[in-house]
């Protein structure tokens, strides 16, 4: 299993970024996918989940109505569109999958929201 995130960077408050996670090594179209984030000294936080078909998504209140998760099962890719970014969204963002009971993580991509 391999998960490779990209798309992070520095953005001003109120701006937007789209993160991408390229997946391989498992049946992507049959798997729920998740995005998490982590800041130093804090536990990793779930920010979005999408079902295998893409017809179910869920978000915590902290990002609801600002973040949108989507997937392309033909390209084995899951996206996280982040709008109206806030300084508190600054974190390393990871995509994640559970495959045969084992949790896999990508290497993460840094998002910094600052003026």
Image (tube, helix red, strand yellow):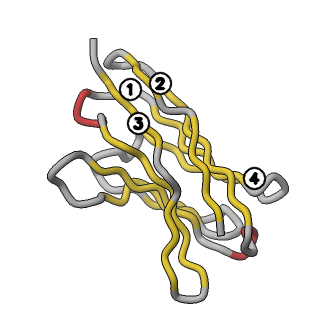
Label whose residue precedes the other's in the sequence (3 or 4): 4
Q: Which residue is mark 2?
A: 16
Residue at (52%, 57%) from the top-left corner?
A: 106
Examine the rendered structure and indicate whether residue 45 appears above or below residue 20. Answer: below
Marks 2 and 1: which is nearer the front? 2
Tell me the distance, in whole angstroms, between the alpha carbons under discs 2 and 3.
Answer: 14 Å
Label whose residue precedes the other's in the sequence (2 or 1): 2
x and y percent of residue 69 in the render? 55, 49
In the picture, the disc for residue 110 is 3
x and y percent of residue 63 in the render? 35, 45
Q: Which residue is mark 1?
A: 84
Query: CB under 8 Å between callouts 2 and 1?
Result: yes
Residue at (66%, 62%) from the top-left corner?
A: 54
Q: Secondary structure at mark 1?
A: loop
Label whose residue precedes the other's in the sequence (3 or 1): 1
Tell me the distance, in whole angstroms, between the alpha carbons under discs 3 and 1.
Answer: 17 Å
Label whose residue precedes the other's in the sequence (2 or 3): 2
């Amino acid at each position: 299993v391999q998960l490779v995130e990209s798309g992070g960077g520095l953005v001003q408050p109120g701006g937007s970024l789209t993160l991408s996670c390229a997946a391989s090594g498992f049946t992507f179209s049959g798997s729920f996918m998740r995005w998490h984030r982590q800041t130093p000294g804090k536990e990793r936080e779930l920010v979005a989940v999408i079902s295998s078909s893409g017809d179910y998504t869920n978000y915590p209140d902290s990002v609801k109505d600002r973040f949108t998760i989507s997937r392309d099962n033909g390209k084995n890719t899951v996206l996280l569109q982040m709008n109206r970014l806030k300084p508190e969204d600054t974190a390393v963002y990871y995509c994640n999958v559970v495959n045969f009971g084992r949790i896999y993580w990508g290497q993460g991509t840094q998002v910094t929201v600052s003026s």
